[in-house]
Image (cartoon, grey):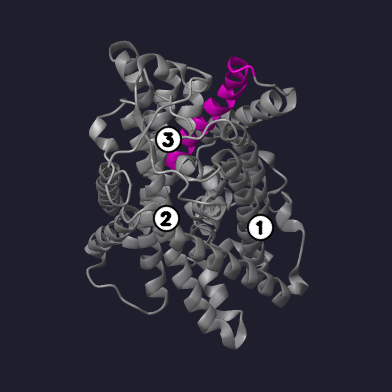
Amino acid sequence: MKHTFKYPATINPKVQETGTVLKHLKRDQLGLRHAISQAVALNAPAGTIVLYVTSTAALMYFTYGSRYPNGAFAIPLVLLLSLVVYGLMSFSMYEFSKEISSSGGYYTFVSRGLASSAGYFTAISYVTYQMLSFTGFGLLGFIGFIYGILPELGVALPFSNYLWIPIIVAFTVFVTALIYAGIKPSLKYVFYAIIIEVTFFIVTSVALLFRFHGALSSAPFTPAPVGNDPLLVSTMMIYAIGTFVGIGGALPIAEETSRPKRNVPIAILATIAILGVTIILSAYSQVIAWGHLNMSSFGTSTPYPVLLIYQHDFGILSPLIMILMIVLVANSYFTATVSLGTNASRVLFSLSRENVIHKSISDLDHRTGVPKIAILIVAAISLVVVISAGLVFERLYPNQPFNALTYASLFLLILESPISYMIHILTNTSLYRFLKKNNKKVSIVKHILIPAISTVTLVFAIFVAVYFNLSAPYIYGVYGALVWVVAIIALTIYVSLKRKDKLELIGDFSL
């Protein structure tokens, strides 16, 4: 059974004039708790605590460890400032989400505020970002964690150079099966998993701070560990901002959420609070437990320092807590990949129903109501990207499968960062134009000043990423992102000039 929806004239006069009828996803399947858990899960708090905290420390050490060997002690500051920046980045989507509800998310906002060509650029950029997150964070993050943690537990992996390929394929099949089962059952699982995950890390972080109360210090929230150098802090934020990129995770499921113009904005605010408390508190507890004078080895001497902390610092409960942490981290990558795949498939569905890409991609499963072709496309492309990236980095780092997979993951994650910045810059720019076009009340502070500050910060972040020569392989992702942005611009120009018919309905859907 196909779902169709005809727009009210006040929302979409273009569609009403042409008499076009567009498909829509099944409404009112989800509540506020599902919207929040979708966004929080997309960030994978447990996976982020393991991957981003460790890799940020490694990046800090490899970049300027000779000057500030214990500079990673400032990770909580870097994360806190990154959260503030991403909060500013999120404000425009928060304001838009009170006006527009569509699985198109960002590209619908930009299409309505600026122009169809800008919306197309945003759409391709967002799908790219989702795919890179799905592969770099979800799939490669999971396999990198497995390859990093099993040797630490004394488990040798046979055929380690290639065993990751069938594991990745099996993991992707499980993720795809859960997404295909329907959004309500998948998010029901995600909801309970997130409650357990967040509670576990908050409780254990507080326990660590109590255990090391004599070492408590405000220094991790100051730039002192990096010589009070604002440029170094800013450079590290470029990578660390990615810690919070899932805050807008509820946008693509808006039309499946009840009262979306109320629940999606609330989900954005709740996600900022939940992620901020969980991740920053955990990072702070880790650096305090590790010790200021030992930070040169944090993220360099062991794949996951948090593993050693949880393995030794909880007394007789340490073995149980460590095992529970491992299970929760592995599951965190699973739920994040489910959320990322769900969002990517919804955006592809939206583009298809608006005739931007082939119409068959918007076909819905008659039983579950999910965009079945879109889900399978996401899975297929992701497997190609992951296996290709993994094999390339295995050539760069022969007989070092953990390093190869970790660097492949970081490459894809850094590759996505400037792309996500471009999406937010366009969203910021669109907000004022959208409100003026629709005769909405405009606030100078909320709709002009805050988006402007966010945009300037993002432009600066892109500039610093290029100017500040990060060490290899991190810099590969920056250069790759610049090449990819140029490619998307070229494709947008081509479609705008040669295939205008593909842009006639882009961004037109909203409940």
Q: Quadrant of the N terminus?
A: top left
- Residue that numbered label 3 is attached to: 126
The disc placed on residue 184 is: 2
Distance between mark 1 and mark 2 Cα atoms: 27 Å
Q: Of marks 2 and 3, which one's residue comes earlier in the chain?
A: 3
- Residue that numbered label 1 is attached to: 277
Instruction: Give the label, 2 or 3, closer to the camera.
Output: 2
Q: Of marks 1 and 2, which one's residue comes earlier in the chain?
A: 2
Residue at position x 33%, y 30% from top? 353
Distance between mark 2 and mark 3 Cα atoms: 24 Å
Tell me whether circle 1 and circle 2 mark residues in contact (CB < 8 Å).
Answer: no
Residue at position x 28%, y 51% from top? 367
Where are the magenta residues, as a range? 414-439
The disc placed on residue 330 is: none
Q: Position of residue 182 (x, y in %)?
A: 35, 53
- In the rendered structure, the answer to whether residue 131 lies left or right of residue 73 reads left
